[in-house]
Image: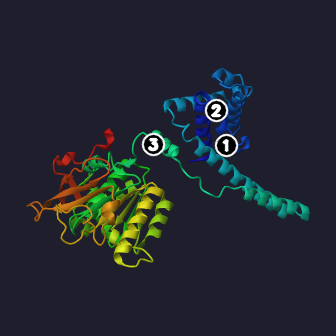
Amino acid sequence: MSDNQAEHDYLAGLLELFSDDPDRARVVSGLVPRDAFSGEMARDVYDAVCGALAAEKSPTMSDLVSQPCYPACKDLVVDLILRSRSSRFGYSLGVDRYGWQIRSSWKRRLVADAASDLQAAVNDPEASSADIMAATKAVQDAASNVENAERMDTLMDAVDEWSRMTETPVVATGFAPVDRLGGGGLPVGGMFVVAAPPSVGKSALALQLVLGALEYDQGLNVVWCLGEMRKEALARRAICHWSTRGTMHKVTMSAADQRTDLARGAGYNLAAAVGDRLSLVSPPLTIQKIEQAVIEKKARVVVIDYVQLVELDGAQDRRAEIDGIVKRLRRLSLEHEVATVCVSNIAKGVSGDTRIGAIGKESSELDFAADILLLGVPDQDEDQNGLRHVRWSCKKNRHGPCEDIVTTFDGRLQTFTDAQASRDAAFDDWGAM
């Protein structure tokens, strides 16, 4: 949240309280000094509200309008009132948090300004030692007032965030069966787990979801963590799947291996569409590398392919290592507000009837941490066209009912389709959304 947005949110909340709860408005107005506002118009709004609160026990809008500074900030007041009226209680609940942020930013600005004055004094040949000492003391005084401790959130903050959120944030993928499970897409701040035996298409499904999300949202950034797959192999799979979208000629894995002209064309088309929005983290995979990439790229989605190949320093044994990795990934998802897709191998003896807690290989932590967990159960054989049916058994879903997904996997094109829909209708029509 920018300083300017925090200021406007704070003032919108103050205006809500001005009408609904003047006593609390007086308390809230004391959270932020006038000088903490970065804009003159915001200061005028603050002065007008405080002036009306001081003049009347139960002020009305006419008391606000009569304030000398009101004409200069009328447009901003009207805009803030309209914003607050469109979302009842959407700002007053969080006003303490906004005030704390404004005050903290202001105190940091004071330190920066004092440091700048000190630098100027040091560089000024005419400055006396007393001038430099005074400037140094000003830096120390400003620094001592900085609020280093984090403000502790309250239930009011939680309700405020909930009330201002129109819906649970998700990243839409365009693959309708998966999007339905997550209430519209991959849950942001949550973990979407794809578990299956080898060669079922775990990575292919994750790649399909990511490419669909990138196609839909042109501002989306994704981080893909390569555990054992080579970059060339990922590119080959991505090109084959991408060629099934739009009006391109389909490129098989064999054609991609041979680097045919059609395959090269699909590759260039893919590169032009996705560009640098899909970033790769190469092995060895560590939590530190993954988190650094998420922060640097401002990623909204991160794919771990696969979880059992991530390393964690200081683990006592393999189970403790996997448990620690999953907990760190869970925290990363929440702190950085990303949708985390975890590709996972499964434990020995796992079948479609296996219950949650016994699916993930080497640890049960991933089963319990997952928001959505899909277990791939393939048919034994491919049909005459090289297609294989894969049932993705939904073992867990925090966002709705556990509905299985029946798909058809075309390994030649690295593409899953909804077995209950026609091939042409397997993907949502993004243009109609």
Badge 3 density bin: few <14, some 14–19, many ≥20, Cα 10 Å: few
Q: Find numbered disc 3 in the image and state the secondary structure of the residue it sits on.
A: helix
Q: Position of residue 378 (x, y in %)?
A: 16, 62
- Per the image, the residue denoted by label 2 is 23
Cα–Cα span, label 3 and label 2:
25 Å
Vertical placement of 373 versus 350: above or below?
Answer: above
Q: Amino acid at mark 1?
A: Leu
Residue denoted by label 3: 162
Residue 123: x, y in percent? 83, 63
Is 16 situated left or right of 64 in this image? left
**N-terminal of the two: label 3 or label 2?**
2
Q: Mark 1 or mark 3: name the one nearer the start of the chain.
A: 1
Position of residue 288 measured from the top left corner of the image (x, y, whole percent)? 47, 69
Q: Of the residues tagged 2 and 1, which is closer to the observer?
A: 2
The Cα atoms of the two marked residues, 2 and 1, are separated by 14 Å
Q: Residue at x 19, y 63 (%)?
A: 354
Within 10 Å of disc 1 (Cα), the crowding (few <14, some 14-19, many 20+) is some
* Residue 297, horizontal then vertical, whole percent: 48, 59
Residue furthest to the top in view is 62
Tell me which amino acid carries mark 2.
Asp
